[in-house]
Amino acid sequence: MEESRGDNSLMLKVHNLFVSYGHIKALKGIDLEVRKNEIVVLIGANGAGKTTVLETILGINIPDSGDIIFNGKSIRGVSADKNVRNGICLVPEGRGVFASMSVLDNLLLGAHHNMHNVKEHLNRVYDWFPILKIRKNQVARTLSGGERQMLAIGRALMASPDLILVDEPSIGLAPIIVNEIFDILINLNREGYTILLSEQNANKALKAAHRGYVLETGKLVLEGTSGKLLNDKRVREAYLGV
């Protein structure tokens, strides 16, 4: 995707963000932007800092310095709980669902910050993911990997978020399921959801996104439209295997 659709207003701005884990500098001056109705992807090797970026935006990590602006207001240091209420949701790496709970209870847990119109949101998730309606009374651990990823995305949608953070959605999935998951993300975006995605599968992610950023050891080293990055020699050699 080269062109952003719809409202092009700035939803998220991360400015000069530094984050440490003890003595380890995990993020070193990150700057990025996400506009409304975009899919923006963070690509990079394992350990590059992609998950740290998403978790810091949500409020799981406290930055050493820098700022995070969401819908015009600073959310640096705001708790994850409050950020979820304000419209940010994270679909964590590894299809993070509550394995001992039913599919339905997992989905309802996603709505606990926003109990208005729960039935409407639930029906909408079932429209997106009919398999979840079929399996609503099943324990989540009995789902396939692809179904658990759908459940994790559906749970985020139950909160009616403005911004969905999706961490490594393709990890551990068969290629045919990866294609299905990325089709889902593209269709959600077409319905108006704004998505910031981290992904090691650079080829698949850049083909789905409008723009991207490349991280290496906590630093942004490249940015641009998806087409620009797909055709960049450094990206092709390092992440596309060509």
Image: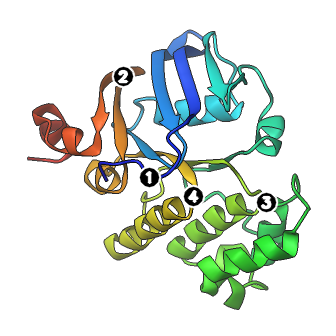
Q: Judge from the rendering whether residue 55 lies leftward or rightward of residue 223; answer left or right.
A: right
The residue shown at (39%, 67%) is 178
Q: Residues within 10 Å of mark 2 (few under 14, many from 20)?
A: many
Label 3: which secondary element: helix
Using the rendered image of the protein, determine whether residue 101 is visible from the camera's viewpoint: no
Label 4: how many Cα within 10 Å (few below 14, some 14–19, many 20+): some
Instruction: Name the residue that disc number 4 marks.
Output: 192
Spatial CA distance of label 4 from label 1 is 9 Å
Foreground mark, 4 or 3, reads: 4
- Frontmost of labels 2 and 4 is 4
Q: Position of residue 37 (x, y in %)?
A: 52, 49
Q: Which amino acid lies under the numbered mark 1 shown in the image of this protein?
A: Arg
Q: Mark 1 points at which residue?
A: 5
- Tag shown at residue 110: 3
Occupied quadrant, residue 11: top right
Mark toward the start of the polypeptide (3 vs 1): 1
Q: Position of residue 196 (x, y in %)?
A: 51, 44
3D distance between C-alphas at marks 2 and 4: 27 Å
